[in-house]
Image (cartoon, helix red, strand yellow):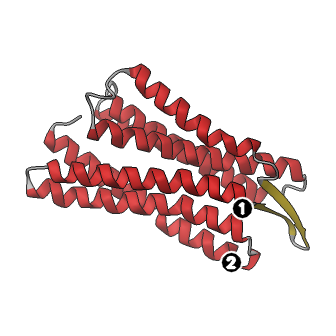
Amino acid sequence: MYKIIRRNPRSRLNQIFSLFILCLIINYIINISIAYSNIQNSNLLIFWGQIYFFFYGLAIGFFFLYILLLYKPKTMTEIWKQIVFILLFGSILAIMFFIPDGFRVDILPTGLNLSINLPQFIHLLIIFFTSFSCCLWMGLKIFQNFDRQILKKRFIFFLVGLSITFFIPLLLVIRFYINVPALTFTFEIIILVLSFGIFLIYYGIGMSIKENNLN
């Protein structure tokens, strides 16, 4: 994240991308804390589960704004528009806190197990899938605007990274909905492997924008 900011500390694109990374880091810390703290209080586990999904969703919101700024920079130039966008996205995401029994805890012989119900599953799935569809569409439009072939080749890394990064929250939503403890470890390994998609995003967009003088 420091390298991203160092390239141009005043760049709005860099700041928003850094907030995207920061939310993912916070999300990762929460995930590790939940996994290794052996929480025995159901309400506390539900609270941290909600915060976990909220920060992942917020990261998606910042990434959505980042792509929107690349695609329509003149439309979203004003800071107040960017703030309103994040507030609206966060407000829609925050509905998950008010869904009755959206997060629940099952008591298993191995300890407490967190899961989500169908309304929560649908709510989060709509947010993540809609965001992914919009970001991918805008990403493809940006791809078509590059004149130099080498930039297009590098931007492909970004598109692949984008797809992988959005696949993670979709996979998480499915994992917590189907709630099969035996598959938890398998899901975690897959998600860990897919995390390299963030590097592909940075490599693809960083190189392409830098050489195309967009930032």
Residue at mark 2: 183
| Place of residue 179 in the rendered image (x, y in percent of width and height, measured from the top left) | 74, 70
Q: Looking at the rendering, in which quadrant would you find the C terminus?
A: top left
Left or right of 40: which side holds 58?
Answer: left
Instruction: Tell me which amino acid carries mark 1.
Output: Leu
For the question of whether residue 84 can be seen, the reply is yes
Disc nearest the viewer among 1 and 2: 1
Direction left: furthest residue: 148
Q: CA distance from mark 1 to mark 2?
A: 19 Å
Determine crowd level at label 2: few under 14, some 14-19, many 20+ residues with C-alpha closer than 10 A.
few
Instruction: Tell me which amino acid carries mark 2.
Output: Leu
| Place of residue 188 in the rendered image (x, y in percent of width and height, measured from the top left) | 62, 69
| Place of residue 97 in the rendered image (x, y in percent of width and height, measured from the top left) | 73, 42
Q: Is residue 7 above or below residue 54?
A: above
1 or 2: tag closer to the N-terminus:
1
Q: Say which of 26 and 169 sits in front.
A: 169
As helix, strand or loop, the secondary structure at mark 2 comes to: helix
Left or right of 36: which side holds 107?
Answer: right
Direction bottom: furthest residue: 182
Residue at mark 1: 118
Q: Residue 161 — which label?
A: none
